[in-house]
Image (tube, grey):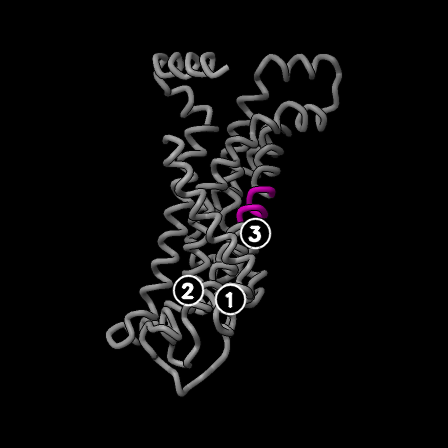
Amino acid sequence: MNRRGVLIPLVVLAIYVLAAIFAPLLAPHDPNAVTLAQRLLPPGAHHLLGTDALGRDVLSRVIYGARVSLLVAVGAVLVGGVVGVALGMIAAWRGAKVGAVLMRLVDIVLSVPFFLLAILVVAVLGPSLLNVVVCLALVRWPRYARVAHSATLQTRSRGFVRAATATGAPGWWIVLRHVLPEVLPVAIVVGTLELGLMVIYEASLSFLGLGVQPPTASWGSILSDGQQYIASAWWLATFPGIALFLLVLAANLLGDAARDRLDPAKRAELPRSRLFQRATMRRKAA
């Protein structure tokens, strides 16, 4: 992917992040203010994206919904990534028995359908913003564990790790100094690809009433309310759907760019002529 192809999703994500951070300044109305006299107004000058069945401004709720979606997505990626990378590296470094137990746990978690596991977690913890983050992290950490386990096994057999082991360096130092820098690029690639998926999962849980609870604005809950008026008030589901689509598309494009840039397997697939061209361009630029 060229630089322009990377710049566009970065700009889109930056817009969403700024909208989430400065939501109180950008939202023209209180997202939770109920005005029944103005219910189901179509898009107009006073309400740019119309109002919902309770007279709440749709634009304000979409802006505040971006804050919820990004907060949940980033939190789930960070928590799931830290837990998954740590367990994957432990499984590969500690030996066959520990690795077998942890990787079988990974297989068990991956074998359970997402929504079934999500319903179980939410039923135990209760629906809330924090619990949605915990739920998504519990569901998705095995993916990080798998790639961290594979990358650690490959790095463990390399010469510089063997040399560090032969000199008597402690295992924790070798892992942090030599193994972790080799695992992080792959984990970052997985995290960028998971970001858009977490947004979809959060919206799905909120759509089913298992995620962020009313009156907090969430794209999933807005879509759930809008489905009842899809024929008479098309704007209720259309604009949150467009916002969700653009965010997920930008996250996926950025994830593809990160994979091409950081994934060692993808870099190895580049033709030699292309690598030669890149090296030539760098020398000219220098």
Q: Position of residue 70 (x, y in %)?
A: 50, 54
Q: Amino acid type of disc 2?
A: Gly
Q: CA distance from mark 1 to mark 3?
A: 14 Å
Q: Position of residue 93 (x, y in %)?
A: 62, 28
- Quarter in which the N terminus is drawn: top left
Q: Amino acid type of disc 3?
A: Gly
Side of 242 relative to 203 (left or right): left
Mark 2 vs mark 3: which is more N-terminal? 3
Q: Is residue 83 magenta?
A: no
Mark 2 vs mark 1: which is more N-terminal? 1
Q: Secondary structure at mark 1?
A: loop
Residue at 51%, 42% (x, y): give it. Answer: 142
Q: Secondary structure at mark 3?
A: helix
Rendered position, 2 above or below 210: above
Bounds of the magenta segment: 75-82
Which is more toward the observer, 108 or 143? 143
Q: Position of residue 201 (x, y in %)?
A: 43, 56
Which residue is under mark 2?
220
Q: Amino acid type of disc 1?
A: Val
Whether pointer 2 and pointer 1 mark residues with C-beta atoms closer than 8 Å, the reply is: yes
Whether pointer 1 and pointer 3 mark residues with C-beta atoms closer than 8 Å, the reply is: no
Which residue is under mark 3?
75
Mark 1 vs mark 3: which is more N-terminal? 3
Farthest front residue? Answer: 45
Q: Is residue 80 magenta?
A: yes
Which is more toward the observer, 143 or 112? 143
Q: CA distance from mark 2 to mark 1?
A: 9 Å
Q: Secondary structure at mark 2?
A: helix
Instruction: Identify the disc placed on residue 212.
Output: 1
